[in-house]
Image: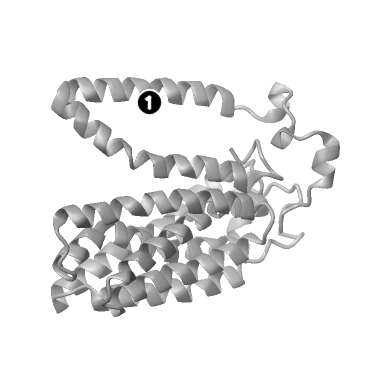
Amino acid sequence: TVAWFEKRRARALSMQTMGFALGGFAAPIMVWGFQTVGWRATVLVVGGVLSSAAWWAAGITGRRPEDTGEPMDGLTAAEADATPDAEGSNGRHLTAQQALRTRGFWMISFGHAFALLVVVSSMAHLALYLTEDRGYSAGSAAIVAGIVPLVQILGTVAGGYLGDRVNKRLISGVAMQMHGAALLGLVWIDAGFSVVIFIVLHGLAWGVRGPQMQAIRADYFGSTSFASIMGWSNIIVTMGAIAGPLIAGSLADATGDYRLGFTILGVAAACGTIFWIFATPPSESA
């Protein structure tokens, strides 16, 4: 995707990210299939559909616009010239080794990792928190967890629009504050509306921030070595995805509830804004 879009990169990636959110609705379909035709037939059908879709998509996106005669972003030369460049987007294509030597690479990676402290821990523990600490029934907790992806979709649409018009570092930094406020409000405000606040703030932050994570890397480092750069970055990002649920779960077992663990993760996410402040574009000599 990043090789096909530059001026409208955030918008394109928002559509891609929306696919992940929509994938959450596949679970009821899978359950219906298991109950109706059995798990073997369901898995075969789903596997066939996914394989066919992946083969078709790879045939299109596996190439670059210049290989097919398609214009970048689908824009004419005049339209492209009239559209401002994103911060850090100057047509340069850094290698993975060059990217690793820039401050932006590390700041983006740690900023992304700190966001996932909240995202993954809430995915893993939200239902348990609602049932054990807030007295929700299992069904009600499942409904709350299912609403978050709906709000995420709205945020993703907004993130694609804003990402091509507003500084991506600013968007990401504000989203980090929203992640932190959502989790802190959830555990420190006992009123029922705190759950609504969490759904709205966390869902929107997740959706708005998501498209910026790949887009800003492509803006800074180009698309030629994008896969390698993402691979190295994901080593750091994965640490946040692993640490969040472990911290929340371990402290819940030790203290008897999720308040301390979620508080630590919420504060950490909010403090993660500092990474985006310093995630400036690479210098010309990088």
Question: Relative to 65, is 187 above or below?
Answer: below
Q: Residue at x 51, y 40 (%)?
A: 16
Position of the N terminus, as image quadrant, is top right
Q: Look at the numbered disc 1 and give the secondary structure of its residue.
A: helix
Question: Relative to 92, is 274 above or below?
Answer: below
- In the rendered view, does 66 fall on the left or right side of 265? right
- In the rendered view, does 197 fall on the left or right side of 111? left
Question: How many residues crowd mark 1 within 10 Å: few (<14), some (14–19), many (20+)?
Answer: few
Q: Residue 75's x, y, as percent?
A: 76, 35
Number of residue marks: 1
Front residue of this view, candidates 285 and 172: 172
Front residue of this view, candidates 150 and 251: 150
Q: Residue 126's x, y, as percent?
A: 25, 61
Is residue 97 visible to us here?
no
Q: Residue at x 84, y 36 (%)?
A: 77
The amino acid sitting under disc 1 is Leu
Quadrant of the image occupied by residue 239: bottom left
Q: Residue 262's x, y, as percent?
A: 30, 73
Q: Residue at x 72, y 35 (%)?
A: 72
Q: Dot 1 corresponds to which residue?
A: 50
Is residue 23 visible to us here?
yes
Q: Residue 67's x, y, as percent?
A: 70, 24
Quadrant of the image occupied by residue 63: top right
Front residue of this view, candidates 33 and 274: 33
Q: Residue at x 69, y 29 (%)?
A: 65
Quadrant of the image occupied by residue 14: top right
Position of the C terminus, as image quadrant, is bottom right
Scheme of colours in the image: one colour
